[in-house]
Amino acid sequence: MAERLFAKILVANRGEIACRVIASARRLGIASVAVHSEADADALHVRLADEAVCIGGAAPAESYLRIDRIVEAAQATGAEAVHPGYGFLSENPAFVEALEAAGITFIGPSAEAIRAMGLKGAAKALMEEAGVPVVPGYHGTNQEPEHLAAEARRIGYPVLLKAVAGGGGKGMRRVDGPEGFAQALASARAEASAAFGNPDMLVEKYIRDPRHVEVQIFGDGRRALHLYERDCSLQRRHQKVIEEAPAPGISPETRAAMTEAAVRAAEAIGYRGAGTVEFIADGSDGLRPDGFWFMEMNTRLQVEHPVTEAVTGIDLVEWQILVAAGAGLPLEQEQIQLDGHAVEARLYAEDPAAGFLPATGRLARLAFPEGLRVDTGVREGDEISPHYDPMIAKLIAHGPSREAAFQRLHAGLRDVELAGTVTNLGFLQALCSDPQVRAAALDTGLIERRAEALCQLPALAPAALAWAAMVALDLSGPPAPRRGFTLWAPLCHLVRLAVEGEEHEVRLCLGDGRHEAHVGGEVIALDWRAGAWWTGAKRAPAWHREGDQVTLFGGAPRRIEILRPGAEAAEAQGGDVILAPMPGLLRALRANAGDRVAAGQPLAILEAMKMEHALSAPRDGVIAEILQPEGAQVDAGAALIRLTPEEEGQS
Ligand code: ADP
């Protein structure tokens, strides 16, 4: 390779893809420039880059979509090339032309290639000419509703209406018969106009049991080769959720036919760089050499490219940079081999139970397990803001077989520790262990059909509630001898918890190295051994607490709220002793020995977790003794105030 690589590149993107591009650049010895919005001033991609330039406000239209600002930033920092990532300006031919006019290399295809593939209808016509199978349908210019309806009849129902300028599943409607056509057309048009400023539609045969299989290609402007296929059939509302490579069950003949068609498509437009040719396949009878059709070509890196990297051992970003620098394709087709199976899951801040509503929040805890590739653009403490896509990370597992890869991904998802926002982690775990998914009985409708089961979180085990009570009382550490314990043992605490709106009571009785939790009629023993707490054979899960919110990890993360952490949560034998429910500072005493008090009357203020908690009288009675002075630092479970026993006090 005689070509000189770039000395410095600018990454015109944010989040995980910007971080990922910067990492490859660094490996190649290339300096990187990040651009960022005002909202992203402290973002991970800014931290990782060698230089960073602020290009405007939080809204993408004010920053990441500003061609002028990005070109200026490249010129000001002396970047020789720009990597666009995906989304934002990655498929914008005007961006390519603006960079070229400024003498800066675009790491990607030519403006013409992007234009050729930009409109679905024109791209299909081009592919038909090149001998690539396309979905039967109408992609002409006559947009009269009557004409489109006639075409739908000719094609045969069900049909799919698609926005020619579409993307991300917008402006798409399935129509099952002529009676629904006019209305579906009107609503698809309205959506397409709003999203893309172009109401034009194409009509396609709706493929039954559809599987989404796509081929990763690479071109040098003349020749192209492929890096095998990915199956992205696990989708929700036409958006990919889990992707894998290779496609399960694909025969050598089907693979040959599909990869050849993809290479033909790339060569037909003199493609340079990384691209993906997407096919829709009829999966009703397995993948067949004559059962797949061109849908569209994405002229950029795809979100799911890591599964291809895992099974080919090739760094696609490195190849993009090399090819853009004028080096030829680094390998010949025969040198690209498949190794095992890889699967990727997209972890999002969203609420599956609320129709996958995007969520925001500060990632109070974020830790990923070993053994997976994790592509992320955020760190613990970062904010998932409403300005951008709420993806938190992509988790990629690689193994010798499909089963091994899925097992690894599933185990990895269970070990993710994440708190501070609601996520699709439980949903991804359910999807990864779904019997149909594991049996590779895939089609693009699988998630929708099984949504209810997949979104349902498993019932919370009593042991989890027992453990949450331990966390609530700050007893999760080693069982240290505590002040007050021997005096008033055995001590029991009543902890009230709320999980997804449902209330639970845990009565936790403390012993020496063994506690007993009474939960809904069950008694659960918690033992301290081997440096941890155990319930039976199970080690207590990892957890995170912020204020009164406890998140338990190790499975679908559960958010548990501690209710009324004041005096009502602490109760001793006979209700005579008021205990500190958590360690803290005894800020104030509101009663003296001999005082008559009423149930609920605040007796002391404990400052803990940066909050003041009022500890109130559990019943009417008379104060027998104050056991700790004002200003004392007390442990959880410490006895603070003793009431005179019931009989005496009633005199
Ligand atoms: P977009 O560009 O909006 O993402 P695509 O054309 O890539 O739209 O299609 C998105 C998804 O819609 C595909 O992955 C597939 O699940 C489904 N789909 C597209 N075309 C068809 C078709 N003709 N029949 C059945 N499903 C289809």
Image (spheres, rainbow, N blue to C red):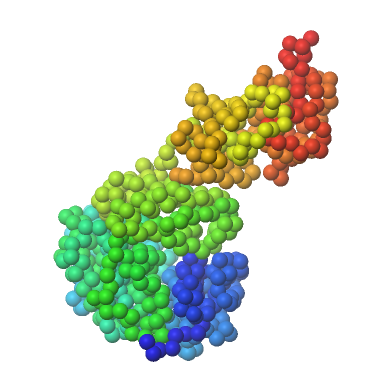
Between 247 and 208, the one lying in front of the other is: 247
In the displayed structure image, the side of residue 406 where residue 365 appears, left or right: right
What residue is at 47 percent from the left and 32 percent from the top?
A: 536
> Between 229 and 637, which is closer to the camera in this rendering?
637
Asked if residue 612 can be seen in this view, the reply is no
Q: Nearer the viewer, residue 640 or 281?
A: 640
Q: Residue furthest top?
A: 651
Q: Please name whichever residue, 341 or 168, is drawn nearer the observer in this view of the structure.
A: 341
Label tally = 0
Q: Quadrant of residue 401?
A: bottom left
Is 145 above or below relative to 26? above
- Asked whether the viewer can see residue 456, the reply is yes
Q: Residue at (41%, 85%) from the top-left corner?
A: 325
In the picture, the quarter occupied by the C terminus is top right
Classify the position of the N terminus by image quarter: bottom left
Q: Tell me where residue 30 appears, x and y as whole percent.
A: 49, 80
Task: Tell me which residue sits at (66%, 20%) in the image.
Answer: 573
Residue 441 falls left or right of residue 194: left
| Left or right, residue 379 beside residue 277 | right
Q: Where residue 11 sits in the image (x, y, percent)? A: 50, 76
Q: Quadrant of ligand 1?
A: bottom left
Q: List the single residue furthest toward the front.
A: 530
Quarter of the view holding residue 379 = bottom right
Residue sitting at x 81%, y 30%: 590
Left or right: 266 with respect to 357? left
Quadrant housing residue 272: bottom left
Residue 108: % across, % down: 39, 79
Q: Is residue 513 placed above or below 436 in the rendered structure?
A: above
| Residue 504 on image: x %, y % | 54, 30
